[in-house]
């Protein structure tokens, strides 16, 4: 059978070929937008599912529970806050990240769009890719308040911890980062060298330091 005959218009083989091309293109687009998110949410870092702490200093511990990648905060079995359904939370961490003497709530959040409702003036339209963000909140009374919410991170966070490596009384944020590529995530879950960040008044700044990691 010749190639001309095989791919003659109207033959079923050409429609099979077109369908395969469209399927591969769709799979590539899906992997670029959601593949790494699925990896980090299902096979990546597993944070502690429930933490009990008194962040609002009222003498009663609140419960911070990750349930199906949503965070539920409750006090005495009364719900105070639940994360939006469009957020997919892969990790939570509680500690004094901004050096104010009080513990904050850090969330590694996967969501669509690089920005929230307030975009930089030079951005005309938000994108719709599923990307990783780092959000920081505090609990005032029974109200959750955002302190800082990053735009889409250049690389997704695989794990994070707070530690005072240089023992100056200010904790650094130590992160292990990965890739948005599904193939890279499966072959090598995260970069070999962790990153070190410190709060600098508004946002975290990466430290170029020789501190032991």
Image (tube, rainbow, N blue to C red):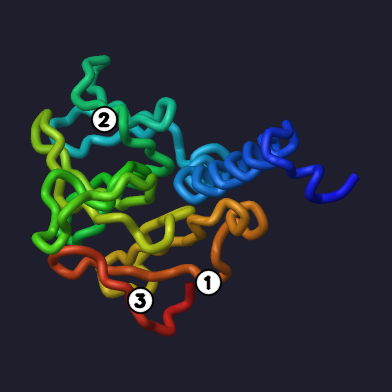
Please identify, in this view, whether the residue under mark 1 or under mark 2 is nearer the observer. 2
Which sits in the foreground, 79 or 203? 203
Q: Residues within 10 Å of mark 3 (few under 14, many from 20)?
A: few
Quadrant where the N terminus lies? Answer: top right
Q: Among all residues in the image, which is located at the extreme right?
A: 1
Q: Secondary structure at mark 3?
A: loop
Mark 1 vs 2, N-terminal side? 2
Q: Is residue 103 visible?
A: no
Classify residue 6 by image quadrant.
top right
Q: Residue at x 19, y 24 (%)?
A: 80
List the residue tagged with mark 3.
166
Q: Reply above or below: 19 against 68.
A: below
Q: Position of residue 139 (x, y in %)?
A: 15, 38
List the residue tagged with mark 2.
84
Q: Secondary structure at mark 1?
A: loop
Q: Secondary structure at mark 2?
A: loop
Mark 3 vs 1, N-terminal side? 3
């Amino acid at each position: 059978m010749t190639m001309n005959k095989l791919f003659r218009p109207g033959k079923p083989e050409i429609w099979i070929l077109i369908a395969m091309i469209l399927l591969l293109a769709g799979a590539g687009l899906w992997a670029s937008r959601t593949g790494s998110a699925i990896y980090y949410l299902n096979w990546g870092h597993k944070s502690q599912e429930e933490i009990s702490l008194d962040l609002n200093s009222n003498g009663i511990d609140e419960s911070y529970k990750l349930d199906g990648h949503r965070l539920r905060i409750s006090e005495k079995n009364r719900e105070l806050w639940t994360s939006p359904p469009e957020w997919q939370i892969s990790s939570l961490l509680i500690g004094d990240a901004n050096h104010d003497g009080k513990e904050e709530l850090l969330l590694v959040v996967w969501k669509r769009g690089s920005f929230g409702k307030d975009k930089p003036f030079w951005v005309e339209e938000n994108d719709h890719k599923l990307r990783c963000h780092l959000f920081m909140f505090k609990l005032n009374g029974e109200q959750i308040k955002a302190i800082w919410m990053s735009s889409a991170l250049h690389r997704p966070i695989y794990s994070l911890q707070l530690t005072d490596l240089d023992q100056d009384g200010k904790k650094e944020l130590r992160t292990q980062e990965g890739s948005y590529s599904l193939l890279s995530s499966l072959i090598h879950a995260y970069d070999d060298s962790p990153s070190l960040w410190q709060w600098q008044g508004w946002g975290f700044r990466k430290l170029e330091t020789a501190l032991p990691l």
